[in-house]
Amino acid sequence: MSELHFVEANGLKFGLLGWGLEDRSRPLVLALHGFPDTAHTWSEIGPELAEKGFRVAAPFLRGYAPTEAPQRDTTFEDLGKDVIALVEALGAERAHLVGHDWGAEAVYAAIGIAPERVQTLTAIAIPHRARVRFTWKMIWGLRHFIGLTLPGAEARFARNDLAAVEMLMERWSPRWRPSEGDLAPIKECLRQSTHAALGYYRAASLRTPAIMKAPITAPMLYIAGLDDPAVTVADFERTRAHFQAGLEIAAIPGGHFCHREAPEACVEALLRHLESPQPTKKEKGEVAVQTGGPRSS
């Protein structure tokens, strides 16, 4: 287990997990979690990247205990500014940004705010909203955006010892059965952080914020789950025109939480991307399908 560290960034005190942080000569990987999840989502991936010479910082997003809660609901711009401030607080000029779910939205916002701070970009499970084409399958998969903002949402989410966590995980990653060890830190965090976590949804819009409209100028990697019930590899491919420095798509076993379901395949794709930041020229539409991790059953 990583030790818990704290840094001040963008007006908040952030708790974070880290691997290899003591050596500031290493390139920084900043890894951002999503919902319903915590920084512990990187507990298998972080040590593997550190063994390969990176220093890895995995903050708890704003409002997710032990990170401080903001005074208002969190916007895309807040998330992007947090990422840039965290890079600075960790003493780096630039960083490799990796984000899953809301963490993916955070890294998209960050590069829109300060592209000079980003060495490479990786998004897991969430295609860039500026070019995404919404399908009926995707819209159905996004129905939680409505449910989590309706009156009484916080109380419903907290019922039966936060049973909604397992429900959402099963909906989004139907082949994965998280262990009690996976669930315990998430529920411990969300018992303290439900209001702040659902605030992301209250402040969200399907419209693309201005800071996220510019084409991406850093080498880009998508990691997509082959079993994702809402987003297909083709959905990621359709956004290719948004990435001026090249795009690689690694399709690996698993659903929305594919990085937790097939961590070996995720690490393999990440290392190829992080260690070779200049994109490989491929024919448009070519997808790297990784099979290094077993499918969950």
Image (cartoon, grey):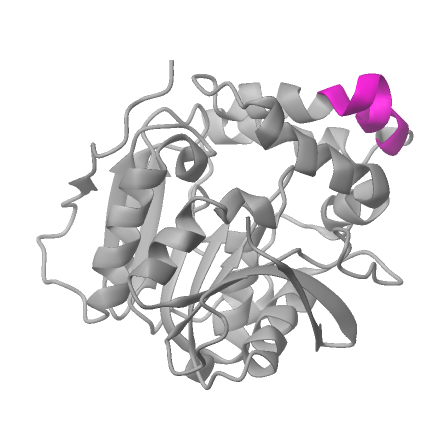
Residue depicted at 52% across the width and 26% down the height: 172
Residue at figure coordinates x 62%, y 40% from the top left: 37
The residue stretch that appears in magenta: 154-163
Q: Is residue 287 left or right of residue 270?
A: left
The percent coordinates of residue 228 (x first, y second) are: 41, 27
State how many labels appear: 0
Locate the C terminus and report the quarter of the image it occupies.
Answer: top left
Q: Quadrant of residue 139?
A: top right
Question: Is residue 234 visible in this depiction of the protein?
Answer: no
Residue 159 within the magenta-colored segment of the rendering:
yes
| Residue 223 in the image, given as x and y percentages of width and height | 34, 45
* Residue 190 coordinates in the image, percent (x, y): 77, 39
**Is residue 187 visible to the viewer in this orientation of the structure?**
yes
Classify residue 23 as left or right of residue 13. Answer: left
Q: Which of the two residues, 14 or 247, is positioned nearer the viewer here?
A: 14
Magenta stretch secondary structure, dominant: helix
Q: Quadrant of residue 290?
A: top left
Above or below: residue 133 compared with residue 248 = above
Residue extending furthest toward the top? 297
**Is 150 above or below relative to 71?**
above
Instruction: Kindly identify the residue that appears in the image at 84 percent across and 30 percent down.
Output: 153
x then y, percent, for residue 121: 38, 64
Please state which of residues 61 and 73 is positioned toward the viewer in this rendering. 61
At a point 89% along the width and 63% down the height, the residue shown is: 71
Q: Is residue 250 magenta?
A: no
Quadrant of residue 237 within the rendered picture: top left
**Nearer-the-camera pick, 189 or 143:** 189
